[in-house]
Image (cartoon, grey):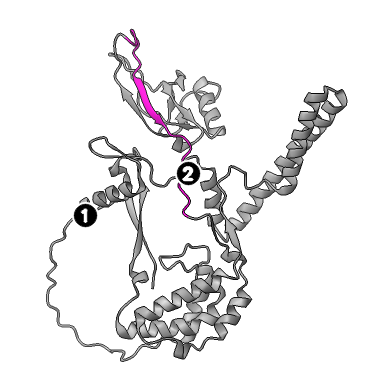
Amino acid sequence: MGDFNAPLIAWSSVYARGSELAFDQRLLDMALRSFFTQHVFFPTRVQEGQHSNCLDLVFTKSLDSIDEVRCLLPVLPLLGRSDHIVLHWDYSMLSVPEQPTSFRRNIWHGDFDQMKTQLNKINWESAFSGNMAEDWEWFRELLHILFSIPCPILRKRLDNRPQWLTQTLKKEVNKKRRLWKKSLADENPASINAYKVQRNKVKRLILRTRKDFDKDLLNRAVENPKLFYNYIGRRTRNRNPVPLLKTSENLEISEDGAKSEHLSEFFKSIFTSERALNPPNFDLNEGPTKEAVSLNDANVHKELLALNESKSPGKDDIPPNLLKELAAELAKPLSIFFQTSFEAGTLPADCKSARITSLYKSDSKNEMASSGQIAIIRQP
């Protein structure tokens, strides 16, 4: 941060006037090559009779490090005769949301053959009672128990270990550290040379390993984009989806429960009451009607195979990957359930409930007006 005196840069459009050798253009190129984020977009030098320019800049490596840069008028005599405004911002430290559980089931490496064997033993015609709500509760719990046993446990670790750090590379890094400590203790030229050889080897291995990891990640992200988003999320400085909020009275809200209540009140306040609609009367000729609808196993099986297994589960916590892998075995019970639900004209509670989350739109993340909402609901 500081007075860089580069008035020819338009930071909002990422463009610099002048020649390529000018300081303004070289500063902009350096910031882009280093992937820096510049947070000041308003004039910071204001003087009567002269053009205002954005000269004082604040660079960070992460977009989430600073929420908003505000300006204060010069306060005399603290700034003397300075014609630069005072910049004020809050710097956000590393923020990681609390983890509700320390482990979860890795559905991607589950024993699907064992699951298929267990499902084939069930007589679905007599398994359902005919009560749509009770049948769905039983079926959902059955699937949860089914994949909780043959799926390995994937433990969640809150560490800063890079994803590209393999066990082989880790051993080489530890060896380099041991040689470094030995060279400090011995002060022997042979020990120092051994350390330098290992250091250069580790550098080459890191470059090669990272390159291979990035290439493999991009190839796999074509089929499963969430792998790429997960990688970006792990490298994000502030991973808390709902940051510190401020009320209209400038009171800070940090507790998750209070944030939820405050966002709920804000979202309810922006809804409008629509006027009752009185549609005109139309004389419509009766068209063909369908007396009965049959949801057979083949149609359900086709829809299950078309699921995107990389999507997240809904409120029922049934992974789409599980439904797709067991499409042949689950087509029969699901067709029975869908037929019962259609004839009863009702849906289970899981199909009508939604997770509502806030999305950042613009301006300060602490302000309510900067948040939009999105409802994630499972399609029946």
| Residue 266, x across and y down, in percent | 25, 49
State whether residue 204 appears in this view: no
Q: Report which quarter residue 345 is drawn in.
A: bottom left
Give the image quarter of residue 378. bottom left
Please say whether residue 202 is one of the residues in the magenta stretch.
Answer: no
State the separation of the CA atoms marked 1 and 2. 32 Å
Numbered mark located on residue 271 in the image: 1
Relative to 87, say whether 81 is above or below. above
Which element type, helix, strand or loop, lies under badge 1? loop
Q: Amino acid at mark 1?
A: Phe
Magenta segment, which residues? Answer: 78-100
Q: Return the residue nearer the eye: 332 or 137.
A: 137
Q: Residue at x 60, y 81 (%)?
A: 117
What main secondary structure does the magenta stretch of the protein show?
Answer: loop
Residue 91 painted magenta: yes
Residue behind mark 2? 96
Residue 89: give x, y in percent of width and height: 38, 28
The answer to whether the residue labelled 1 contacts the one labelled 2, judged by CB atoms less than 8 Å apart, is: no
Considering every residue shown, the one lying at the far right of the view is: 190
Q: Give coordinates of residue 161: x percent, y percent.
A: 62, 44
Vertical position of residue 264 compared to residue 49: above or below: below
The image shows residue 214 at horizontal and vertical percentages of 64, 48
> Dividing the image into 4 quarters, which one contains the C terminus?
bottom left
Q: Residue at x 55, y 46 (%)?
A: 158
- Label located before the other in sequence (1 or 2): 2
